[in-house]
Amino acid sequence: MITEALVLSAILFVIGTFGVLVRRNAMIMFLCIELQLNAVNLSFVAFSRLFGIEGQIFVFFVMTVAAAEAAVGLAIIISIFRHYETVNVDSFNLLKW
Amino acid sequence: MSGVLLSLAALVQGSSEAANEAGHFEPFLPGLIVLLPLLGFIANGYLSLRHARVSADSVRSGSEFDLSDASSRPSTHTLPTWIGPGVMGAAFLITLVNFSRMLGVHLEEAVVVHYWTWIATGTFSVEAALQLDQLSIIMMMVITGVGTLIHVFSVGYMKDDPGYPRYFAYLNLFVFFMLVLVMGSSYALMFVGWEGVGLCSYLLIGYWFSDREKADAGKKAFIVNRIGDVGFLVAMFLLFKNFGSVDFISIFHDADTLIYGGGLVTAITLFFFIGAIGKSAQIPLYVWLPDAMAGPTPVSALIHAATMVTAGVYLVARSSVLFALAPFSSAIVAGVGVLTALFAATIALKQNDIKKVLAYSTVSQLGYMFLGVGVGAYAAGVFHLMTHAFFKALLFLGSGAVIHSMHEAYHATHSHEDAQDMRNMGGLHRPMRITCITMWIATLAIAGIWPFAGFFSKDEIIWYAGAWAGAEGAPYPQLYTVYWMLALVAALLTAFYMTRMMVMTFHGKNRTGEKEQGHLHEAPPVMWIPLAVLALLSVFGGWINVPEALSSGWAGLGGLLPMSEWLHHWLEPITAQAHRVQEVNLGKYSYYAPFGGGEALWAAISTILAGTVVFLTVQIVRRQEILAVKDDATDLSGFSKILFNKYYVDELYDRVIVQPILRISRFCWRVIDAGIIDGAVNAVGWGSKGAGWLVSMFQTGSINTYAFILTVGVLFVLGASLF
Amino acid sequence: MAPVLFYMFAGLAIGGAIGVVMAKSPIGSLLFMVTTLGAMAGTFVLLEAHFLAAIQIIVYAGAIMVLFLFVIMLLNLGHDYQKDLKGGAFAVMSFGVTGVIAGFLAQELGTTGIQDGPGGASIDALIAEHGAVGAIATELYTTYVVPFEITGILLLVAIVGALVLAKKEV
């Protein structure tokens, strides 16, 4: 069970990474990041079966932080949207050399 | 005036008596002799810098002060007039005191006054020390004495030049270096002076640097000198390698360890001679001296007649024991000397510029000096050096007075004729009586007419060339016989061209022009007094080294004239070591010339022949139709043309040496320096820019790209941690 | 029974994840995400992490996804179904890199072959003693109380920050 769970977590993580790399919509990118976080949660829980309850406690904290991060990140996206009228990340290119 | 002289004599007497009682030679402020000209240089240099702002423009354009407006002159002229000749006079007086002290003591070894250690590394150490012995004191007397006279002359000659303080600064610096050269106690210190006089010669020849030709002449002198200096350096290196030191005393002490005629001593002496060839203008490095006439005439008198060019002769005389141990090198020295004497004499026959005639005459007489020291007559070579300083300085200063007068005449009529061309002169004995008389004295001296100075010195050299040819163990008897004959021919040529010069300049009809004639006048006292002093020396200066055979015979009027063999005995401690080597290896020199006849006979023959040449030349040249430059339309042809163009030696050097070097330099500059080296440095710059541009491509501003690179980084970390 | 369930939930999760990445409209992505989260909760249950499964549904699927939905609604994003997938070489490269990472991870994690471990027994004991919630609470409020409190402060900061960032005029 643990092994399968870990493999699943790896696959989900990789899918999430692919999504971050490939999507242009900022909202969807954010969603994919959440997917990555979830995959990591799964792997923590799987390892807690090996090592003890600490894994699950860590998942607790990860979720909390994910929530906080989601709130702040979405607020940022809203304020950017106000300026650019779009959430397409290709138009956020002020850092271009 | 007499009071001063008396007290001076008392002072001199007193100090020499004290030395007599003490039994050894106590040098009197020798450092001051060297220091005074240096202080003069600093003072005059400071003055010239201070006035540079005022006079810079006129110096740059090569013009002079307005002759009618003397008010601007005192501000720049007063101090240098006193400092320049003043330090020289003071140096001469101190030298005189030392000389008189040395007279009373029979000095066996040189006295070295030590000041500080200049170089001290490992096994090599050079002291900053001055050596006072018989040879150096003679040189010092000549340098400071004739130098003072020339400084006084310059006060009058250069009075219209805006760079007046700079002139005296350079002149003083030159004397400083020359004194270091002759007073140095080691070859290294001599080399300091050697290089220094080369530098000052460049500064003074290119004194009027705004004229491109004159500046080039200065460069030519310095560069050709430098070619010879390589030889000097190599010889010094060889000496150090063999003896572990470059001090005179230690080297000559161990000189007996050298094998007679061996490879090492031959190499050392040949390399020293290469240095001497450069400095003393022998074949093939004489080309700078005629060009050096671009400098002011007193400079030519001091540097190119009396002092700098004699440095080579001094070097050989100082290293007499080394040259005595190397008969091959000595033969080469003598051969080059006599060839140069003959070669330069032939060129001088056809020159029209008065200073060029004197320049080639100098080269020729230097050849005589080298002939003297080459055949082993070191005292005779030094003697000719001394008398040559007197009459050649007189000739140059006299020509300077003539040129000065011609220049003022042309200036007054705003004419642009050449003031130095003898075809523009003629009949100057009327306005310039004193100059004419003194220059005739010098001409008779240089021609070798009894009883003037040049007769005794030149005759002694020619005599020794013949005498050593007949020595028992002479290595090259036939060669030395040839040298003897060539020297005689060159002496006759000397008489001819010098007389030609005198007649063209001072006698016959005046060709300067109708309007200028009224402006020709005698030189002011500040200029003719040194001429008179030098004339006296040219008359009586030769009487201090007359061999017994002559002074008791006809030359000394049966012992009536106060002649003596003083110089020969004076220099005995210096040349003793060399004479011992000569006695051991060559035996005694013969008392008869190669074709028979003793010294007195050949002396009489040479002076009669010289006198005949002078007389005939006067007749020939007076009858010649000489035209002024602007009227002279004749073209030379044949051998005359070759002589006038100095055998095209300069053109040959240009073709064979200068142009290839220029081409190589241009190649090095354009291809190697600008192309390869600069290109490499520039390439580094471009490479950095390119690398920066490449790296900047990472900054796309696109979040996806950043995330991608992040992921690639994660991949690497994973890979590294797993493997 | 458990393996079958597990593979079912796993398939659902993966399908949902792929849907998140490939869906054209943001709302579609969001709904696929909810599916994935639900499947993950199921997996948690299978791994005896009951409390976390509940939290996952309540907090993640219930609050965070709703927040996302609200923002999408606010920004009126659901209308234009524009293709915003990056195509071309970049997508291929990304696929390649992520595939390699997947391979590494799968190789390392998948070859352990562990089915259950010693930690599981301690968790079961804890659950038996205190109950599912109590098992976590016991540790949380004793050993990890400081991070707990700090997390509280973190949430406070996040709230204030979100408020400040999203205001119309600062």
Image (spheres, rainbow, N blue to C red):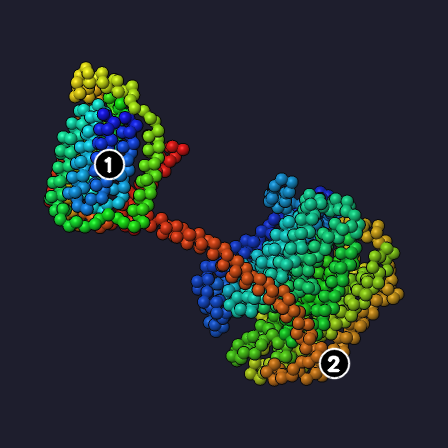
Residue at 46% x, 53% y: name it. B681
Q: Residue at the far top: name it.
A: C129
Please, which chain is the residue tagged with disc 1 on? C
- Counting from the top left corner in percent of width and height, residue C90 is at 30, 48
Query: Mark 2 — on which chain does it sit?
Result: B
Which residue is painted at 19% across and 29% down in the image? C42
Which label sits in the foreground, 2 or 1?
Answer: 1
Q: Say whether mark 1 and mark 2 are on the same chain.
A: no
**SS of the residue at dot 2?**
helix
Q: Which residue is mark 2?
A: B619
> Along the line of sight, which residue is nearer the eye, B566 or C24?
C24
- Disc 2 to disc 1, C-alpha distance: 131 Å
Find residue B608 and report its image quarter.
bottom right
Crowding at mark 2 (Cα within 10 Å: few <14, some 14-19, many 20+): few
Q: Position of residue C161 (x, y in %)?
A: 15, 37
- Badge 1 marks a residue whose secondary structure is helix
Q: Is residue B433 left or right of residue A69?
A: right
Is residue A61 left or right of B30 when viewed as pictured? left
Q: Residue at x 72, y 66 (%)?
A: B340
In the image, what residue type sits under mark 1?
Answer: Ile
Vertical relation: B518 (above or below) B234: below
Q: Is residue C168 above or below residue C104?
A: below
| Mark number, residue C14 | 1
Side (left or right) of B536 relative to C22? right
Q: Nearer the viewer, residue C91 or B498?
A: C91
> Can I make out residue C124 in this image?
yes
Q: Please state, as top left, top right, bottom left or bottom right, where the N terminus of chain A lies in the image.
A: top left
> Residue shown at 47%/68% (left/top)?
B58
Q: Position of residue C159 (x, y in %)?
A: 14, 34
Front position in the image: B532 or B193: B193
Q: Is residue B467 left or right of residue B399?
A: right
